[in-house]
Structures are given as C-alpha cells and as structure tokens.
Image (tube, rainbow, N blue to C red):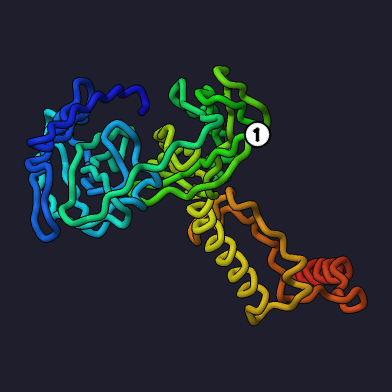
C-alpha cells in the first residue's frame, strides 16, 4: 500500500513473518492462549513512527485486514514508537478477536504516511473458519499517490473555510466496469479520528483502465494547524496526505483594531457629552464660540496679554456739555482790560 511492496514469509514452527522489502513484523511464538503474552518486534519502519500492535482475526499476512480494526481485539492493543533506525520491541497480551481465525498480529502507523505489516499467529482455543471469497467484479486500486492542489486566498486569511482539491489516479483491476464510484474523504486534526464524507465521482472505469479523479476537500471556517486528508474506497484506506493550514491572522488583526477603536470612540462621545452639560455657558454662547483646530497651540497666560490687542480704555470723566463750556475768549479779554487799567493807575 502506498508504494510499499511487502513480501511476508511465515514460519510454521516459530510463527515469524519477515518482510523482504519495507516494514517487517516478527512474533516470538506462533501460538499462545488467552491470558498469555508474546513479544512483537519489527524493523524497516519510519524512524520515530508511532505504531499500533493488534491481534486481528479473519486475516492472513498477504492480505489486508477485512473490515479494518473491527476485526481486531482493540481493547488489548498496544502502542509503540520506533527508534531512530525504525525498529521496535513490544510485549502484547494475547486476546481473542471478535471474529474467527485465521489470525495475525497486525502493525500499522497511527500518524504520518500509511504503512502496515502483519505476521501469522494462532490464538489457542479460538474458532477457525475459512476466509470469505472475494466478490467478483470491479475493484479500484490506487496508481498514483494523491496530492492536494490549490492555495489559500485573501478571504482565508480572514477566517474563510480553507479549500483544496485531492487529485489521484485509480485503476480498475477487477473483471467488470466500475460506474460512478463512491469515495470517502476524511479530514483529521492532529491525532483525532478522521471525519469522513462520501463523495461520488461521475464516470465509468472499465477493467484494466485508469482514471484521474479530483475531489474537493473543505475545512471548517477558521481552521488552522496540521491536518491529514485521507482517501478511502471499499472500506480500505488508499492514501493520506498532510495539509498544513496557516492561522487566520486577519481575524486577530480585526479584533486588535476593534479593541483599540471602540474605547477611543467611547471616550470621544463621553467628552462631547461632558462639554454639552458643563454649567456656566448657554447654548447660544457655545454655538457662537469658535473652536480652534487641534493643531493650533494654545497660548499661555504670559503670552496671552501680548498676543491680544488692548482695548482702548474709556475715560471716566464725561465730556462737558456744549452749554456748560466756559467762554475762554471772553475771559481772556476781561483779564487783558484789568491788567491795562492797573498800568494806567500806576
């Protein structure tokens, strides 16, 4: 699966399965009863990969597990992390799977690119039934790994739902044509389970033919972080693609500006209300009083006297009325006559 060709060889005596190429799984014993345990080892895995180890029924190492993990003893499964060289060692308790044997010890990756391997194992005392025959007909197989196409726009920067297109090529390896196949596209965030959505592709794929399929992928509004897009058909996961979604910084900028603008507007409204209800001035005076622009400096007390022109002071002495003004000419003549008489007498 996904370009990994796994060739497993089962040893009847030791219950060991070895992969010539790709990941491998080995079991310390080929058979054990419920309540016991076996040591599971492996190699060839991706370094630091997180793996899940399960006992699954109705399976053989050369085929995928039918029904997925529903055929496995999930409650007794164990997780393990591969070392820097892709090797691991884990003790696994023996438990009965929910379906009859033949059984395997199945190991698969939890995160990252899909990879899996299995080793034959027999649960002592558990029922054994023949494997169901594969239904004849059309069967799709992934020919090229899926890839995400598209980019985020300006609206995504402000919280719009991110969108992409999942593009892949499938081929019909069955004996009959496949018409209007239904795929399942899942999106998962981090270690959470995928959220699956069915999408139907319109067209017919004849036996031996291939087709290029494009399916839309949408996320919720405001989504950001590391996502994984999965593709499933017929209960089998065909591809997984990582998708890194950036944070919508436009929303953060909007709320930051809102937190700055709203208090400033409220402050201006409050100051305007205070100015209107201030006592000592009538409404007409407030309307007549001109207001200087904000950029004009206000003069201080020392410069205000020099800046403003002095008004002419009104004389406190009232001007004399015309009929009370003394006759200056008559007085001067009278004084002249008096002085002349004095000179004559002398």
Left or right side of 75 for 64: right
Tell me, yes or no, if residue 151 can be seen here. Answer: no
Quadrant where the C terminus sits is: bottom right
Residue 73 as seen in the image, left or right of residue 83: right
Could you tell me which residue is drawn at 12 percent across and 46 percent down? Answer: 31
Which is nearer the eye, 215 or 139? 139
Q: Position of residue 142 (x, y in %)?
A: 46, 26
Residue 44 lies in quadrant: top left
Whether residue 273 is visible: yes
- Mark 1 Cα-neighbour bin, 10 Å: few <14, some 14–19, many ≥20: few
276 is higher (above) or lower (below) than 218: below
Closest to the observer, 105 or 304: 105
Q: Which residue is located at x 41 percent, y 34 percent? A: 240
Give me the residue at 88% from left, 76% from top: 321
Residue at position x 43%, y 48% in the image: 194
Q: Quadrant of the N terminus?
A: top left
Q: Position of residue 2 (x, y in %)?
A: 37, 26
Q: Secondary structure at mark 1?
A: loop
């Amino acid at each position: 699966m996904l370009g990994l060709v796994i060739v497993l060889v089962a040893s009847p005596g030791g219950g060991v399965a070895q992969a010539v190429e790709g990941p491998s799984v080995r079991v310390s014993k080929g058979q054990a009863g419920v309540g016991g345990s076996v040591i599971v080892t492996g190699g060839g895995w991706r370094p630091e990969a997180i793996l899940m180890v399960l006992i699954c029924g109705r399976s053989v190492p050369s085929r995928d597990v039918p029904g997925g993990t529903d055929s496995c003893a999930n409650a007794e499964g164990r997780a393990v992390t591969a070392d820097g060289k892709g090797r691991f060692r884990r003790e696994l308790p023996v438990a009965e799977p929910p379906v009859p044997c033949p059984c395997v010890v199945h190991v698969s990756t939890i995160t990252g690119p899909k990879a899996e391997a299995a080793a034959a194992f027999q649960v002592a005392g558990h029922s054994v039934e023949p494997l169901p025959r594969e239904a004849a007909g059309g069967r799709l197989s992934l020919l090229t790994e899926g890839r995400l196409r598209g980019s985020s726009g300006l609206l995504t920067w402000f919280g719009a739902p991110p969108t992409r297109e999942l593009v892949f090529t499938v081929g019909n390896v069955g004996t009959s044509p496949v018409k209007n196949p239904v795929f399942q596209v899942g999106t998962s965030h981090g270690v959470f389970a995928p959220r699956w959505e069915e999408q139907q592709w319109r067209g017919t794929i004849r036996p031996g033919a291939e087709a290029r399929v494009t399916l839309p992928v949408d996320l919720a509004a405001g989504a950001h972080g590391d996502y994984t897009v999965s593709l499933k058909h017929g209960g089998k996961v065909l591809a997984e693609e990582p998708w890194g979604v950036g944070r919508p910084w436009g929303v953060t900028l909007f709320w930051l500006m809102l937190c700055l603008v709203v208090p400033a507007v409220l402050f201006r409204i409050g100051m305007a209300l205070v100015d209107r209800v201030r006592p000592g001035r009538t409404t007409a005076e407030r309307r007549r009083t001109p207001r200087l622009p904000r950029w004009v400096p206000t003069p201080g007390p020392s410069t205000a006297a020099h800046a403003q022109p002095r008004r002419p002071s009104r004389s406190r002495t009232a001007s004399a009325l015309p009929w009370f003004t003394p006759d200056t000419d008559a007085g001067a003549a009278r004084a002249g006559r008096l002085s002349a008489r004095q000179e004559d007498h002398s």
